Image (cartoon, rainbow, N blue to C red):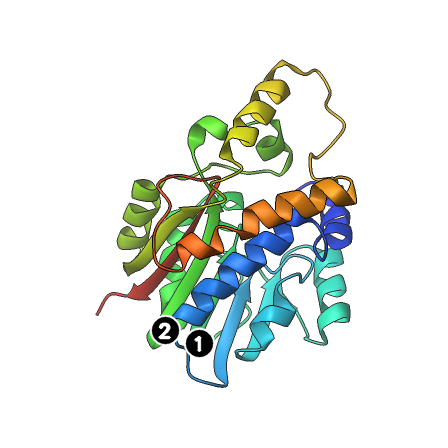
């Protein structure tokens, strides 16, 4: 990502509707996994550490991150020594096995996504879970994706195939951030016709609008508790290693 994107993430990750809503969705799925207590957890590409507090509730947490600023910032707010590393070539947790590996909106930043998925299975315990989120739908790829150095967006079938090719069984997969999908279409159209090129598109809206968007996003929890979404701006996937 562009360097300034990490600084914006650090400022926004606690209160911005998208970060808060995504955390709520992720936590819903983690709670559905019925994880044992005090498990070993790895977050891949933890960014500025917005998810570390949530994940640490489930057990012993390790994390790694490529960007220097993000790594130091995440360590400072979490008390966890975030390690220097990246997929697929520099994984700083050799000879370790984890019950849960998490990778939230990271895979789209990696050119060789298939190898990266395949490598992660080597770090999971026998019944371990890989939980990841990615942005959805190629036709939504726009200026924001380019500025964030995304290589791609995914659809459900493509991500499922990628997981299978990497040696995983897909236990669960669903779109989410569905209710705000129409607004995203409008935003992409405005983005397409706009000549503005100075923003990373991730500024926090006015607190009233931020609150409304968060409530809309979070309201999907009631559906996702028992059902899948047919489309959305993001995908969440839970995989286990093929036996």
Q: Position of residue 141 (x, y in %)?
A: 51, 29
Please give the residue where the numbered disc 1 appears in the rendered image.
98
Query: Looking at the image, which is closer to me, 210 or 191?
Result: 210
Where is the N terminus found, in terms of image quarters?
top right
Query: Could you give the CA–CA distance between mark 1 and mark 2, rounded to whole angstroms?
Result: 7 Å
Residue drawn where x is 50% and y is 44% of the image: 177
Q: Position of residue 87 (x, y in %)?
A: 50, 56
Query: Looking at the image, which is closer to me, 235 or 180?
Result: 180
Callout 1–callout 2 Cβ contact below 8 Å? yes
Residue drawn where x is 50% and y is 85% of the image: 38
Query: Looking at the image, which is closer to me, 63 or 233?
Result: 233
| Numbered disc 1: secondary structure | strand
Q: Position of residue 75 (x, y in %)?
A: 72, 69
Residue drawn where x is 38% and y is 45% of the image: 229
Q: Is residue 112 above or below residue 80?
A: above
Please give the residue where the numbered disc 2 appears in the rendered image.
128
| Numbered disc 2: secondary structure | strand
Query: Looking at the image, which is closer to me, 109 or 51?
Result: 51
Q: Position of residue 162 (x, y in %)?
A: 32, 48
Horizontal side, residue 211 vs residue 226: left or right: right
Which label number is shown at residue 140?
none
């Amino acid at each position: 990502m562009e360097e300034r994107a990490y600084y914006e993430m650090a400022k926004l990750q606690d209160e911005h509707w998208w970060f808060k809503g995504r955390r709520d969705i992720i936590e819903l799925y983690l709670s559905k996994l019925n994880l044992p207590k005090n498990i070993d957890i790895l977050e891949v590409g933890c960014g500025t550490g917005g998810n570390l507090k949530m994940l640490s509730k489930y057990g012993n947490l390790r994390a790694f991150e490529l960007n220097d600023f993000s790594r130091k910032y995440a360590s400072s707010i979490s008390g966890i020594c975030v390690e220097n590393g990246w997929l697929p070539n520099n994984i700083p947790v050799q000879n370790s096995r984890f019950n849960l590996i998490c990778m939230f909106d990271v895979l789209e930043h990696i050119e060789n996504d298939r190898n990266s998925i395949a490598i992660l299975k080597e770090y999971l315990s026998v019944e371990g879970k890989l939980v990841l989120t990615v942005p959805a739908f190629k036709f939504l790829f726009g200026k924001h994706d380019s500025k964030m150095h995304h290589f791609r967006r995914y659809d459900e079938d493509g991500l499922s195939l990628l997981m299978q090719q990497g040696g995983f069984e897909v236990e669960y997969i669903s779109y989410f951030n569905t209710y705000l999908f129409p607004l995203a279409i409008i935003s992409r159209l405005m983005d397409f016709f706009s000549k503005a090129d100075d923003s990373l598109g991730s500024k926090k809206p006015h607190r009233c609008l931020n609150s409304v968007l968060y409530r809309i996003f979070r309201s999907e929890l009631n559906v996702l508790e028992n059902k899948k979404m047919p489309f959305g701006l993001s995908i969440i996937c839970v995989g286990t290693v093929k036996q």
